[in-house]
């Protein structure tokens, strides 16, 4: 096993060495005086320059980072002599000509002011880099802002994700252009003071006009490194309210209103209820997905249709909406006339 050997007093000196070793092996860092008292998340963000912040927090949450052989959270403080386990991570090396370059990109804008920015994210685009993805929406939009501001401002623009969408989920995605707005929006999300609604098409006839699903969820990482979620009574509380919008003999269009914001919450709740989402490659009906793909439908039918909240700066109610993308609208049209609604 390759590891960092004979650590010097200040581990910050290991930047270049980490870039050589971290891709394929676990690395060990001994904490010196220069990092004593620092929070572990801030230390890792400095040590792993170029790695997306979201990925740094992900390896902390998953327990891949160990401090003196123990799992710790992001707020843990370092002390002289601590031994830190850092898992293999891909650190971009700008000196290499084949290093992937973030390409600036523009996305349809639903709302923008000096504090917030909302876009209509297409399916198939990750919101951030990491886990084999070189870059996502946030990196591309930051690069776009840098291009626009080049020669006007030297410091990089502030832009952070307020929330996340799965790669194959389309629709409303909110970003913060100021740290104060980010903190305020996170507080609204924690307090359940936002109105987040999705549209999902599932296999089968959903029998309820309205149903609240309250099932606890546990997040874990597979041996292959994939994030997954399972139903677990010891997991985090998760609540989704489903409302039936349209029903056909073999499928139902549902509106899902999130009361909590757990990873893969809607997908796992519907799979648990035996109504898997069309095209869901993690929790869905794989035989049905195969038939759908043969017919030309090759994405997941989950769409972030609405996000409502009180603006943290102005106090004005904001309602962001995204219509069904053409491929989802066309899929619904192919199902034919929906049945009349019944209780």
Image (cartoon, helix red, strand yellow):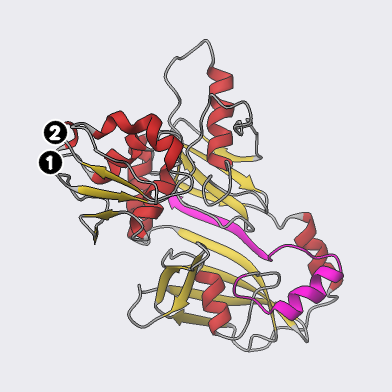
Q: Which residue is drawn at 70% across and 69% down?
A: 279
Q: Within 10 Å of the Cα at label 2, are there few (<14), some (14-19), or many (20+) other Cα atoms? A: some
Residue tagged by mark 1? Answer: 80
Residue 8 drawn at (x, y percent): 22, 32
Residue 99 magenta-highlighted: no
| Relative vertical location of residue 282 with respect to residue 106 in this rendering, above or below | below
At mark 1, the secondary structure is loop
Residue 59 drawn at (x, y percent): 39, 54
At mark 2, the secondary structure is helix
User: In this view, which residue lies farthest toward the top?
Assistant: 151
Residue tagged by mark 2? Answer: 33
Q: Within 10 Å of the Cα at label 1, are there few (<14), some (14-19), or many (20+) other Cα atoms? A: some
Is label 2 in contact with label 1 (beta carbons under 8 Å)? yes
Q: Distance between the residues labelled 2 and 1?
A: 6 Å
Q: Give the range drawn in magenta.
A: 282-310
| Relative vertical location of residue 36 with respect to residue 258 in this rendering, above or below | above
Residue 297 magenta-highlighted: yes
Query: Which quadrant: the C terminus?
Result: bottom right
Is residue 313 shown to the viewer in this render?
A: no
Disc on res. 28: none
Is residue 200 shown to the viewer in this render?
A: yes
Among the 4 quarters of the image, the one containing residue 170:
bottom right
Q: Nearer the viewer, residue 192 or 74?
A: 74
Q: Of label 2 and label 1, which has the lower sequence position?
A: 2
Residue 277 drawn at (x, y percent): 65, 74
| Relative vertical location of residue 37 with respect to residue 64 in this rendering, above or below | above
Q: Report the side of 216 relative to 212 (left or right).
A: left
Q: Residue at x 59, y 83 (%)?
A: 209
């Amino acid at each position: 096993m390759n590891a960092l050997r004979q650590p010097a007093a200040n581990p910050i000196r290991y930047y270049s060495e980490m870039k050589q070793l971290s891709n394929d092996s676990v690395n060990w860092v001994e904490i010196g005086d220069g990092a004593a008292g620092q929070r572990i998340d801030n230390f890792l963000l400095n040590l792993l320059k170029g790695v997306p912040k979201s990925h740094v927090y992900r390896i902390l949450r998953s327990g891949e980072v160990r401090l003196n052989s123990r799992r710790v959270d992001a707020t843990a403080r370092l002390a002289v002599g601590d031994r830190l386990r850092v898992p293999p991570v891909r650190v971009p090396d700008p000196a290499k000509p084949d290093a992937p370059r973030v390409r600036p990109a523009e996305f349809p804008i639903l709302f923008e002011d000096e504090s917030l920015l909302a876009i209509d994210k297409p399916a198939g685009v990750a919101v951030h880099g990491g886990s084999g993805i070189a870059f996502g929406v946030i990196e591309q939009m930051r690069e776009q802002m840098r291009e626009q501001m080049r020669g006007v401002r030297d410091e990089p623009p502030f832009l952070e994700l307020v929330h996340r969408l799965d790669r194959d989920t389309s629709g409303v995605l909110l970003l913060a252009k100021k740290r104060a707005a980010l903190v305020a929006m996170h507080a609204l999300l924690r307090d359940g003071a936002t109105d987040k609604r999705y549209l999902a098409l599932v296999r089968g006839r959903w029998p309820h006009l309205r149903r609240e699903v309250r099932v606890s969820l546990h997040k874990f990482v597979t041996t292959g490194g994939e994030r997954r979620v399972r139903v677990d009574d010891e997991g985090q509380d998760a609540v989704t309210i489903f409302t039936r919008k349209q029903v056909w003999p073999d499928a139902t269009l549902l509106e899902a209103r999130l009361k909590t914001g757990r990873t893969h919450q809607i997908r796992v709740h519907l799979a648990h209820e035996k109504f898997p989402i069309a095209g869901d490659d993690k929790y869905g009906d794989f035989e049905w997905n195969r038939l759908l793909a043969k017919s030309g439908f090759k994405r997941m039918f989950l769409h972030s249709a609405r996000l409502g909240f009180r603006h943290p700066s102005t106090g004005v109610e904001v309602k962001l909406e995204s219509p069904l993308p053409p491929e989802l609208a066309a899929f619904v049209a192919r199902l034919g006339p929906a049945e009349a609604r019944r209780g």
